[in-house]
Amino acid sequence: MADTALSPATLLARAAQLYDAPGSPLAPAARRAARSGFASGAAWMALALEALRGGPLLSPSPAPNFQFLGLAKYGLAGGLAFVWALAAVWLDLALLGLFAVPLFYVIEAQFVFLFPLALDGHTRPFRAARRWTARAGGTVRVMAVVMPIAATMLGGGLVGRGFVRSWCLGCLAVCVWYERVRLAGAREGPVS
């Protein structure tokens, strides 16, 4: 396994550099990124990957159903966290309910590369995403990167940089990380 780890701060700084670059299509396209839910978010991530690679992506055929992928990913993560929190309250162990947040990110870490993999045409993106989590260092290492990125995505708007920009920077940071893992994998062999 190649060292594919970058700190969340490094990923976010690189994402900001790309997002704010003169002539970058990313900031102007950001406002449309959430208009159609996961489908328009995936279209924006495709634009981000094209900007990173300096050229167009090969469009997978048939096109993935990004609404399904997003709902499944966050349904699994959110559903498990919700059940945990509900059980903790029901058992009168409310403090254990706080573990719902890291539990959400245990699931999120398994699928952090789901959308980029689907954009690159993987026919089984859920299965591939789990393998890529292992390639990126495993669940704990991926969580250590994902949670600070998520904090930026969710809280960045509160510190004056705007919610859309903060959300897009987090997605772009994941794309930067994905490219690092992808290029390391190209040297080591396929992980589809």
Image: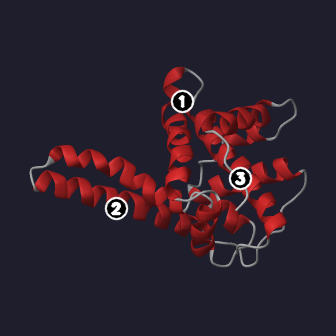
Front residue (pair 58, 117): 117
* Mark 1 / mark 2, whichever is N-terminal: 2
Looking at the image, do the residues carrying marks 1 and 2 touch, with CB atoms under 8 Å apart? no
Q: SS class of the residue under badge 1? A: helix
Q: Which mark is residue 76?
A: none
Q: Which residue is mark 1?
A: 156
Q: CA distance from mark 2 to mark 3?
A: 32 Å
Identity, as a three-letter code, of the amino acid under mark 2:
Gly
Q: Which residue lies under the disc numbered 2?
A: 79
State which quarter of the image contains the C terminus.
bottom right
Image coordinates of residue 164 in percent, x first then y, are: 60, 36
Which residue is the site of mark 3?
Answer: 3
Q: Earlier in the sequence, mark 2 or mark 3?
A: 3
Q: Residue at x 84, y 68 (%)?
A: 58
Mark 3 crowdedness (10 Å alpha carbons): few <14, some 14-19, many ≥20: few
How far separated are the C-alphas under marks 1 and 2?
A: 25 Å
Relative image position of residue 113 (x, y in whole percent): 63, 60
Q: Nearer the viewer, residue 69 or 17?
A: 17
Residue 46: in sight, yes or no?
no
Residue 27: image location, x then y, percent: 74, 36
Q: Residue at x 64, y 41 (%)?
A: 168
Number of residue marks: 3
